[in-house]
């Protein structure tokens, strides 16, 4: 396996990385960003209707447009845990992942028995832990889930990981709820039809599936802010407070959710010029992504390098150094 030496973010921000900068994408004229003939890329996204899914499919289309000779496919998964394993094993080249699951993966903790080799191309946007109930539900706090039917997220998803941690923080044992492993769309339908009392999902806001649910059934989100101290004490700074405004889903009031960073992850062995090209398209073709998937959340250059504890891929580092000049 190829080993790469990674540069600290402080050095990157200071422009302290030595050596000349090589322009891998030539003049970037029109649709021809680079000559990478015969290359295929696979992107592991997430549940249908989620932001990972919407952004991942739009990004795949734009990468294929802008990178000559590159074929790009996006495929749905149950998201973070599966995506991390697929990228580490080479089944997928690029994967979306929640920061808490990615931290577990490289440390070999939580659902990962051993550390895995992963690096980041960028921090994308922050996701919010949704605990969705109907507007007239008696569930006012997480503790009220005891004895109820709850969608905990698909197996292998980051949602399921966070949901379990939140229940533990609230003092609820796993056998005190009737949990399902439904997908996001199945959970939304279950709440709509009365088969579920609540469901968890982790996503950027607004989430398309939750928005569609709110158009047929009045909903609200359960406040999770009071559990943040227990989560950070147990799992560290991967979790922060994330206010969700009323405008997101026509909510009766704003709530404090738990926020989690998101990363786009790759294997360290991904070709450096290819990683550079993908990173450049992500930031320099955002208008095209927006035309394909309007108002989808996209990475912000100011936050892109803050992927700790994952190191940045050298190809991504090169692009960020150039933008600093």
Image (cartoon, helix red, strand yellow):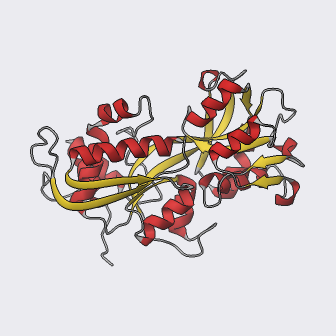
**Image coordinates for residue 312, horizontal then vertical, percent:** 36, 57
Q: Closest to the observer: 227 or 76? A: 76
Q: Residue at x 73, y 43 (%)?
A: 199
Q: Closest to the observer: 145 or 9? A: 145
Q: Eyeballing the image, is 173 above or below 220?
A: below
Q: Which of the 4 image quadrants contains residue 136? A: top right
Q: Residue at x 27, y 37 (%)?
A: 285
**Image coordinates for residue 77, horizontal then vertical, percent:** 53, 56
Q: Is residue 218 left or right of residue 99?
A: right
**Image coordinates for residue 21, horizontal then vertical, percent:** 14, 53
Q: Residue at x 45, y 51 (%)?
A: 263
Q: Residue at x 67, y 27 (%)?
A: 214
**Image coordinates for residue 139, horizontal then vertical, percent:** 84, 36
Q: Is residue 312 left or right of residue 209?
A: left
Q: Is residue 311 left or right of residue 20?
A: right
Q: Eyeballing the image, is 4 above or below 64?
A: below
Q: Closest to the observer: 137 or 140? A: 137
Q: Quadrant of the N terminus?
A: bottom left
- Residue 280 appears in view: no
Q: Which of the 4 image quadrants contains residue 275? A: bottom left
């Amino acid at each position: 396996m190829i080993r790469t030496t990674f540069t600290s973010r402080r050095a990157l921000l200071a422009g302290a990385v030595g050596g000349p900068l090589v322009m891998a994408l030539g003049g970037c004229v029109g649709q021809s960003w680079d000559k990478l003939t015969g290359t295929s890329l696979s992107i592991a996204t997430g549940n249908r209707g989620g932001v990972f899914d919407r952004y991942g499919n739009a990004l795949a289309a734009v990468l294929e447009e802008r990178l000559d000779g590159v074929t790009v496919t996006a495929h749905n998964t149950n998201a973070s845990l599966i995506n991390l394993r697929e990228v580490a094993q080479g089944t997928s080249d690029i994967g979306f992942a929640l920061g808490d699951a990615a931290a577990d993966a490289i440390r070999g903790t939580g659902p990962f028995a051993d550390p895995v080799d992963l690096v980041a191309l960028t921090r994308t946007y922050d996701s919010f832990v949704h605990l969705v109930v109907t507007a007239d539900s008696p569930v006012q706090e997480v503790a009220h889930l005891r004895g109820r039917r709850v969608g905990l997220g698909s197996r292998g998803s980051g949602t399921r990981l966070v949901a379990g941690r939140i229940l533990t923080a609230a003092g609820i044992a796993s056998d005190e709820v009737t949990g399902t492993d439904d997908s996001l769309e199945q959970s939304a339908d279950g709440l709509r039809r009365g088969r579920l009392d609540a469901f968890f999902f982790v996503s950027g806001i607004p989430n398309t599936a939750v928005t569609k649910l709110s158009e047929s059934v009045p909903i609200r989100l359960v406040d999770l802010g009071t559990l943040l101290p227990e989560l950070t004490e147990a799992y560290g700074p991967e979790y922060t407070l994330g206010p969700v405004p009323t405008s997101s889903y026509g909510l009766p009031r704003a709530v404090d959710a738990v926020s989690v960073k998101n990363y786009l992850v790759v294997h360290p062995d991904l070709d450096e010029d290819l990683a550079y090209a993908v990173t450049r398209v992500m930031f320099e073709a955002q208008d095209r992504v927006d035309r394909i998937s309007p108002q989808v959340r996209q990475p912000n250059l100011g936050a892109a390098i803050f992927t700790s504890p994952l190191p940045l891929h050298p190809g991504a580092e090169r692009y960020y150094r150039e933008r600093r000049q």
